[in-house]
C-alpha cells in the first residue's frame, strides 16, 4: 500500500508513503486514493480527512516520470482522466478534506493539494506546476484549479514559466490558508481546524462544499444551488437542534440528520 490510513476519533489521516521517490504519484497510488475516498464517502465513522506526505521533504513531489515517459496520445488521455476523477472525489467530498503540505508539492502534488478544501503548509513547502519542462501541461485539473484559486494572470505565469513558489507567497496568492514552522505544528493545526469543522452540522458542511463548487460549474447556477441547499437545511433535524441550542444557550449536538 502506498497510502497509510489512521482513524482517530472521526478524523482519518491519509499519508502518501513513497519516500524513496519523494511520494511521487503513480497510477497505483492514484487508484488507491480513489478507493480510499470512496470508502470515506460511505464510512459513517469518518467525519473529516487530513491528507499529507510521509517524511519531511515532500507532500507529493509530482507524478511518476517513468510512467509519463511511456505514454502515447490514447493512454495519456485516460491517464489524465483517471487522476481528474480521483481528485474530483476529494473536491466534491461532503466531508472536509485538509491538505497538510510539508515540503515539495509540485505537478500532481500541487494538483492534489488544490483538490482539497483547505491547504496548510510548512515554511519549507514549495508549490509549482513544472510540466512544461517535460513538454506537457498539468493533467490532473491543475490548469483549472490553479486559475480558480489565484487568478488567470498569475496562474498563467506559474504554469508557463514552471517557477516554484514558497509557502508565504502561496499564502499571499490565496493558494494556502496558513503557514506554520514545521511538520509537528502542521499536523496539530490541521487537526485543530478539522475538529472545529466536524463539530458543526454535517449536512450544512456538505452543502457548503456543493455550493462553492457550483460557482465554478457551467452546468448549474451557484445562487440556485445555494437557495435549494438553504431550503433543504431548514428541513433537517440539525437545523432544529442548532436553533434550539442557540436559544437555550447550550452547545448544539448535531447528528447529520
Image (cartoon, helix red, strand yellow):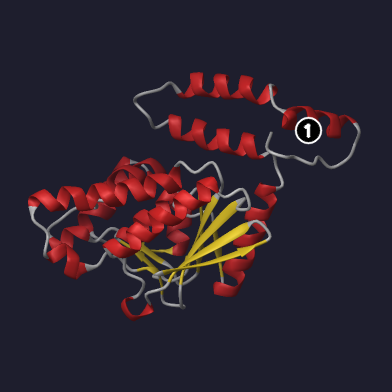
- Between residues 245 and 255, which one lies in front from this camera angle? 255
Q: Which residue is at 63% across, 54% downward?
A: 194
Against 155, residue 121 (above or below) is below
Mark 1 is surrounded, within 10 Å at the Cα level, by few (under 14), some (14 to 19) or many (20 or more) other residues, namely: some
Quarter of the image that includes the N terminus: bottom left
- Between residues 64 and 132, which one lies in front from this camera angle? 64
Is 130 displayed left or right of 1 in the figure? Answer: left
Q: Residue furthest right?
A: 248
- Could you tell me residue 4's position as x and y percent? 48, 69
- Between residues 254 and 21, which one lies in front from this camera angle? 254
Q: Which residue is at 29% across, 60% downward?
A: 107
Residue located beneath label 1 in the image:
242
Q: Which residue is at 33% across, 68% downward?
A: 61
Is 231 displayed left or right of 41 in the figure? Answer: right
Q: Which residue is at 90% across, 36% downward?
A: 249
Quarter of the image that includes the C terminus: top right
- Could you tell me residue 179's position as x and y percent? 54, 63
- Could you tell me residue 88's position as x and y percent? 38, 44
Q: How many marks?
A: 1
Whether residue 122 is visible to the viewer of this picture, yes or no, is yes
Q: Quadrant of residue 135?
A: bottom left
Secondary structure, mark 1, is helix
- Could you tell me residue 48's position as x and y percent? 59, 52
Amino acid at each position: 500500500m502506498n497510502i497509510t490510513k489512521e482513524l482517530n476519533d472521526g478524523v482519518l489521516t491519509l499519508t502518501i508513503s513513497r519516500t524513496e521517490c519523494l511520494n511521487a504519484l503513480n497510477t497505483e497510488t492514484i487508484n488507491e486514493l480513489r478507493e480510499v475516498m470512496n470508502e470515506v464517502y460511505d464510512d459513517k465513522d469518518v467525519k473529516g480527512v487530513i491528507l499529507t506526505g510521509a517524511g519531511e521533504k515532500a507532500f507529493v513531489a509530482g507524478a511518476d516520470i517513468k510512467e509519463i515517459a511511456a505514454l502515447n496520445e490514447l493512454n495519456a488521455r485516460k491517464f489524465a482522466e483517471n487522476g481528474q476523477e480521483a481528485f474530483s472525489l476529494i473536491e466534491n467530498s461532503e466531508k472536509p478534506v485538509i491538505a497538510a503540505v510539508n515540503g515539495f508539492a509540485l505537478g500532481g502534488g500541487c494538483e492534489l493539494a488544490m483538490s482539497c478544501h483547505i491547504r496548510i503548509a510548512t515554511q519549507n513547502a514549495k508549490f509549482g506546476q513544472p510540466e512544461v519542462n517535460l513538454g506537457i501541461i498539468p493533467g490532473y485539473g491543475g490548469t483549472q484549479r490553479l486559475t480558480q484559486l489565484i487568478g488567470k494572470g498569475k496562474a498563467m505565469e506559474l504554469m508557463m514559466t514552471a517557477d516554484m513558489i514558497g509557502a508565504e507567497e502561496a499564502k499571499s496568492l490565496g493558494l494556502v490558508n496558513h503557514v506554520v514552522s514545521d511538520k509537528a505544528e502542521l499536523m496539530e493545526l490541521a487537526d485543530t481546524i478539522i475538529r472545529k469543522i466536524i463539530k458543526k452540522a454535517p449536512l450544512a458542511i456538505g452543502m457548503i462544499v456543493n455550493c462553492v463548487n457550483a460557482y465554478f460549474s457551467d452546468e448549474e447556477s451557484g445562487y440556485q444551488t445555494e437557495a435549494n441547499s438553504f431550503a433543504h437545511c431548514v428541513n433537517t433535524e440539525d437545523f432544529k437542534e442548532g436553533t434550539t441550542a442557540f436559544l437555550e444557550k447550550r452547545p448544539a449536538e448535531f447528528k447529520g440528520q
